[in-house]
Amino acid sequence: MDENTINTMLSFLNDESPIVRGATIDALSDIYTADYATYFLPLLNDKKRSVRVKAFMAVAVLNEFQIPEAYKEVYKKVEEEFNAQIEVTGDFSGGRAKKASYYLKKGDIVNAILWYEKALEIDNLNNIIRMNLANLYYRNKEFDKAENAFKLVIEQEPEFSQTYYSYALLLAELNRVEEAIKQMELAIKHTPNNVRFYYNLSLLYDKINKLKKAEQVAAKGLKIAPDNESLLYVLAYVYQKSGQFSKATNVASRLVQLYPNNQQYRTFYNQLKALK
């Protein structure tokens, strides 16, 4: 996001509408972490409780000792409002998921997992919550639980490509590469224009030394996004690995043209020129 867009969004934090202020907090806190927390601190004093609570959630990335002295008292007051709101909505999946999100912002994965699990006890068909939970299981290295959660989402919503992608990454980490390839191919089948899927599938084929397939997948992704940095790099790498030094040099040359300040690409290009 460019600087002008960021500045425009920050100005919306002072909008007359509490709906706009709240939505802006949500948008910025989803994109940024502690970098923008200081912009949310004044909104702990907002006249609307809904905005105050959103601001409290947004600054959850800060430890209490990081809260400036001028905001410590109001921070504690809004924390009580937040907890009261969670208490009222605790019988609903959304309230429990909100508690999980709060703990996640605090970096407390164990409690985030606990509250997502509690949310699913109420709404077992909510696959947005289940995906969040699956990814947290993955991060917490609870791989069996993550796999079961991904499989259940796929069973219930087989068109959702992100599940196949996340499941493929899990399988790759477990060195079940052939299975990971199958899942990544399914991700591409359901969302054929996502170049990140092609990049990861190319790497998976490279991992089992199927270099021709890795090359074909990267090339196909580049038809969608010809200047994609990751795909260009992996294609040059695969060309180099398979001894196609002239092709590798041409692709590396393109990387240098697109990213002239990247010393890694320039070094790679010079190494390839020496082999060409």
Image (cartoon, rainbow, N blue to C red):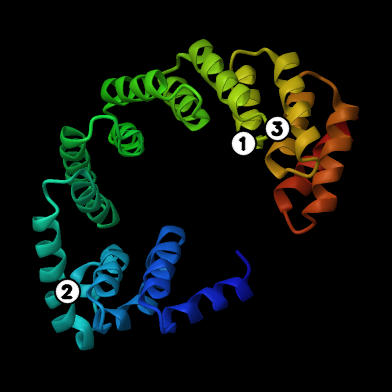
- Is residue 270 visible in the rendered image? The answer is no
Q: Which residue has dot 1 on it?
A: 196
Report whether residue 155 is seen.
yes
Q: How many angstroms separate mark 2 from mark 3 (CA)? A: 49 Å
Q: Quadrant of residue 151?
A: top left
Q: Which residue is mark 3?
A: 234
Label 2 sits on residue = 78
Q: Residue at x 64, y 31 (%)?
A: 199
Counting residues from the start of the chain, the first of labels 3 and 1 encountered is 1
Disc 2 marks a residue whose amino acid type is Val
Question: Is label 1 in a helix, a strand or a loop?
Answer: helix
Going by the numbered disc 3, the residue's amino acid type is Val
In this picture, residue 249 sits left or right of residue 66: right
> Dot 3, how many residues are within 10 Å of its Cα: few (below 14), some (14-19), or many (20+)?
many
Q: Looking at the image, is mark 1 or mark 2 earlier in the sequence?
A: 2
| Residue 182 percent coordinates (x, y) | 54, 14
Q: Nearer the viewer, residue 29 or 119?
A: 119
- Name the element at disc 3: helix
